[in-house]
């Protein structure tokens, strides 16, 4: 039996998050960057860049996946176990590699890149083992880290991306209202989280009937579990007076949005209310600072001063916001657009960024718990547009 190293298995129609001209525009900018850097072919391996340039969001399960872009071609590389699904979800060509022999993935890649070329790769993603295989199979003349250039491109959203992000922010709000309806003393965190997740998935299916549905999730924390922003859901039972952290995360075709709110069950004590109101004030102040021409570091320092004046800065746990787009808690991040002291990126129209101050007051201290508010803002010519609709603050979120 003749068993090929790779082949093309194309059946069905292409179904993509965006129109073809959106992907062609992204590829055109990428090819301009490639030409400027002297790169003949890019070998992308990360979920975020493959999804950004092709629309295909892979499920690795231990197998390598890729996207090869040259000045003329754009080809996704996927494992035979996926059959034609990668083709249906890819802009451009798609090659399937077989596992009859080891490293057919790299043989498929080489069929597009050729040998002795200057190869662009993602130094922040490609493992040492896979980089050694790239060198062995492609025999590159040289290699260039293309990740920083692609991250800069992803930070600026197209009109099509902004339309999707606006819709996704509304889906996050739907999850927030479902969570509020489910909150009551005696209910477990997991039950509340499921209510929010189910509501969002149904809303996504209604708004995006041709999408693939996966990865939407909720982090809903109570009491001591609110101390970390990324603490997983547990079966802890809600009690009257508990501080709560509502966090909804709809995922639509690889695009991430979020809603985060501080809540209390039935009542909030005076010490907690004071901390909460201070964090809300910082949130509002921070949103007022997000405008074109201001650097991430400058915004951070101003909010730091705001908290320091109230003797709260020592309770801050992370940066004050980050970019949105093709990213997730397990892949991808536009680290060049985060509100931190060490990021000097200047805000520009078309960027999307959150404002999310968080204070963690240790157990045994008055007002103990984690306080978080989170809105998504699109930077425009005049300042910003807040696309989060769910209310924040004590008047709405003492449930």
Image (spheres, grey):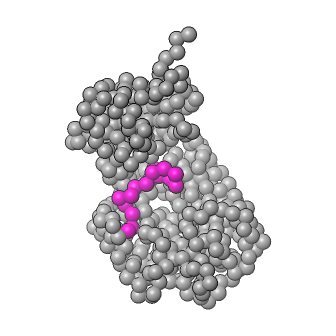
- Tell me: 307 left or right of 383: right
Work out whether residue 153 can be spotted: no
Q: Residue at x 59, y 64 (%)?
A: 231
Q: Position of residue 293 (x, y in %)?
A: 28, 67
Outermost residue, right side: 186
Indicate the quadrant containing the N terminus: top left, top right, bottom left or bottom right.
top right
Outermost residue, bottom side: 270
Disc tally is 0
Q: Residue at x 58, y 42 (%)?
A: 212
Residues in magenta?
A: 325-340
Indicate the quadrant containing the C terminus: top left, top right, bottom left or bottom right.
bottom right
Vertical placement of 28 versus 380: above or below? above
Q: Residue at x 46, y 25 (%)?
A: 104
**What secondary structure do most residues of the magenta stretch adopt?**
loop
Q: Quadrant of the rendered structure where residue 53 is?
A: top left
Q: Residue at x 42, y 42 (%)?
A: 127
Q: Position of residue 349 (x, y in %)?
A: 33, 60
Vertical placement of 258 versus 90: above or below? below
- Tell me: 46 left or right of 231: left
Q: Along the line of sight, which residue is nearer the eye, 89 or 63?
A: 63
Vertical placement of 159 versus 375: above or below? above
- Tell me: 48 left or right of 168: left
- Queried whether the magenta region covers residue 273, the answer comes back as no
């Amino acid at each position: 039996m003749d068993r090929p190293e790779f082949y093309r298995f194309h059946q069905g129609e292409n179904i993509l998050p965006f129109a073809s001209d959106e992907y062609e525009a992204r590829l055109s900018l990428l090819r301009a960057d490639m030409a400027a850097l002297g790169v003949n072919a890019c070998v992308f391996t990360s979920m975020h860049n493959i999804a950004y340039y092709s629309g295909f969001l892979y499920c690795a399960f231990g197998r390598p996946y890729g996207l090869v872009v040259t000045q003329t071609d754009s080809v996704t590389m996927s494992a035979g176990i996926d059959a034609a699904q990668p083709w249906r979800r890819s802009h451009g060509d798609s090659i399937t590699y077989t596992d009859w022999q080891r490293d057919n993935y790299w043989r498929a890649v080489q069929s597009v890149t050729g040998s002795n070329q200057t190869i662009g790769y993602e130094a922040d993603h490609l493992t040492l083992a896979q980089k050694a295989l790239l060198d062995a199979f492609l025999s590159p003349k040289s290699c260039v880290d293309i990740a920083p250039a692609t991250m800069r491109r992803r930070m600026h959203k197209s009109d099509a991306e902004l339309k999707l992000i606006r819709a996704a922010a509304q889906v996050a709000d739907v999850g927030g209202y479902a969570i509020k309806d489910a909150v009551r003393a005696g209910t477990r965190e997991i039950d509340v989280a499921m209510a929010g997740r189910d509501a969002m998935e149904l809303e996504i299916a209604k708004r995006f009937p041709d999408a693939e549905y996966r990865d939407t999730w909720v982090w809903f924390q109570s009491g001591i579990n609110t101390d970390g922003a990324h603490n997983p859901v547990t079966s802890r039972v809600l009690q009257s007076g508990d501080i709560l952290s509502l966090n909804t995360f709809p995922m639509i075709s690889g695009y991430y949005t979020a809603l985060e709110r501080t809540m209390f069950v039935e009542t909030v004590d005076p010490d907690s209310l004071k901390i909460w109101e201070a964090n809300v004030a910082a949130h509002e102040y921070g949103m007022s600072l997000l405008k074109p021409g201001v650097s991430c570091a400058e915004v951070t320092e101003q909010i730091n001063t705001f908290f320091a004046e109230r003797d709260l800065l020592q309770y801050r746990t992370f940066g004050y916001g980050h970019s949105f787009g093709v990213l997730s808690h397990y892949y991808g991040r536009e680290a060049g657009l985060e509100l931190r002291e060490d990021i000097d990126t200047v805000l520009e129209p078309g960027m999307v960024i959150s404002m999310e101050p968080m204070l963690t007051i240790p157990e045994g201290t008055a007002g103990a718990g984690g306080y978080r508010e989170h809105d998504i803002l699109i930077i425009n010519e005049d300042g910003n547009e807040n696309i989060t609709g769910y209310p924040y603050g004590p008047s709405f979120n003492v449930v």
